[in-house]
Amino acid sequence: MFDSITGSITNAVNKIRHKDDVASLKKAITELKKSLLKADVHHKTTKDLVTAIELETKRLGIGHDSFLKALKDELTKILTTTGNQGFVFSNTPPTVVLMTGLQGSGKTTTTGKLANYLKLRKKKVLVAAADLQRLAAVEQLKQIAAQIEVDIYFDDNEKDPVKIALAAKEKAKKEFYDVLLIDTAGRLAIDEELMKQLKKVKDSVNPNEIFYVADSLTGHDATKTATSFKEQIGIDGVILSKYDGDTKGGVAISIANQVGVPLRFIGTGEKMPDLEVFIPDRIVSRLMGAGDIEGLAEKTAAVIDEKKAKEVTKKIKKGEFNFNDFLEQLAMMSKLGSMKSIIGMIPGLSQMAGPIKDMDFENSDEIKRIKALIGSMTLKERETPSLMNPSRKRRIAKGSGLSEAQVNKILKQFKNASKMAKKLSSKGGMKGLQNMMK
Ligand code: GDP
């Protein structure tokens, strides 16, 4: 995430040569200005921002630290909009939310992500498929709902989104859902038909909130379309999708500064867990390459089952970690979301990560091989890895399509890992680890 901005901030800071050197501060400011514009920050916002940073740096006394502090404070200030953060529940459930956005913005995916986010927080969620514009949208939402195990309301014979939205609201009320998320139709560009239809849906269900999903890859256009939606429909929050990978990052600054609606969430990848509450100082920290450990801890807490974690630790201590535990841990990792979204949260890692950044953890060849191998084991073998012998290994190799050498290699790695984990989890384990790292 944000590689371009993080890199150019370092360049800008390095322009400052000496303490109280006004000329070099000017150079740093010019460099920063260039990089903000390149990162798609609107020119007016950029101008205001760099002016404020220059003044504040001078006030603090020119130097690397003061420049960084001024940058951090001013970025945080600009990203801090008045209004809500994250999700707000109505006092009288169900909380009804309209999900709006242009076609391809990530609206349907984000509806699923938000449902998943709420489900992880123990809410009873219903999604409604009222995007009848894009041919595959209903089918896509059905698949997502099945994947995250959230209920869905749809009606394949109904052509009127208003009726679908109303029926879904009725169901949500009757069956005591906490939240109803309605996926509405998008168009390729803003047009009157779309706005009319959205207004009708809005007037009929009277939602608690309307979220606008803005595609951050569209840069300045994201700011423009969000503004149009705000003026024509009225929106309560922006969710910035695709804020990962090649995103320039600056679009958040522009939206926060110009649309006048709070940024509520960001989408940081294609998977269901890749959604985060938009918290300004954390985003700034990541923009500046300083990570977001707090965010990572929260993300982990939401997916980790503490009781399970304790059980597994006990097993590891006894040297009983088996293949079933392994599969469970893998499944938990994938709930954390894509590698890219996690990397930006660990200080310094985004600059160092290189190839891991693009690693698709679940779909990597290594993980696929291990899964195939475990898939060919009997239940007993999965629970008791020590049962393994040459004839069992041959059978597993045949069943999984791996060579015997590959099977041997994976089993050996598993055995070593399990031993290592046992050592580390026993008393003095940390010391052992420290010794290993020396
Ligand atoms: P809709 O037409 O607005 O409903 O768009 P979709 O939900 O079908 O999303 C369009 C594409 O964007 C899909 O390929 C999604 O996987 C992808 N997408 C959505 N959100 C994100 C995100 O936060 N990051 C990335 N990398 N891709 C996303």
Image: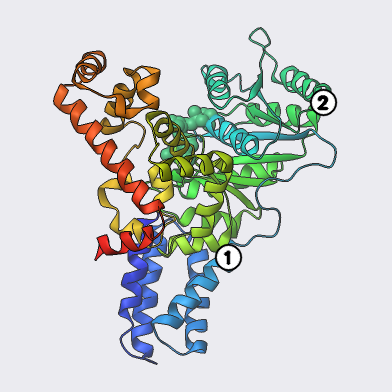
Q: Is residue 127 above or below residue 67?
A: above
Give x and y (percent) for residue 344. Answer: 41, 54
Compared across the picture, whether 334 is left or right of 171 comes to left
Amino acid type of the residue that numbered disc 2 sits on in the rendered structure: Lys
Residue type indicated by callout 1: Ile
Considering only vertical position in the picture, is 430 above or below 322? below
Farthest residue, direction bottom: 20
**Mark 2 near ligand 1 (CB under 8 Å)?**
no
Residue placed at 22% from the left, 22% from the top? 389
Q: Quadrant of residue 148?
A: top right
Q: State the image coordinates of residue 367 (x, y, percent, origin top left).
A: 31, 32
Q: Are marks 2 and 1 in contact (CB under 8 Å)?
A: no
Residue behind mark 2? 173
Q: Give the residue number, with chain letter if any, for mark 1.
A: 78
Query: Can the viewer see residue 188 in this picture?
Result: no
What's the mark number on residue 343? Answer: none
Residue at horizontal 36%, vertical 77%? 28
- Name the element at disc 2: helix
From this view, report whether residue 6 is shown above or below residue 29. Answer: above
Q: Give the total number of marks visible in the rendering.
A: 2
Q: Residues within 10 Å of mark 1 (few under 14, many from 20)?
A: some
Q: Residue furthest top?
A: 157
Q: Disc 1 on helix, strand or loop?
A: helix
Of the image marks 2 and 1, the number of the one nearer the N terminus = 1
| Horizontal and vertical percent position of residue 55 | 51, 83
**How crowded is the residue under tag 2: few (<14 C-alpha within 10 Å), some, or many (20+)?**
some
Task: State the residue in front, 283 or 307.
Answer: 307
Which residue is at a point 35% across and 58% down the rendered structure image? 349
* Residue 341 pos. (x, y %): 43, 47
- Cα gap from disc 2 to disc 1, whole angstroms: 39 Å
Position of residue 143 in the picture relative to residue 398 (left or right): right
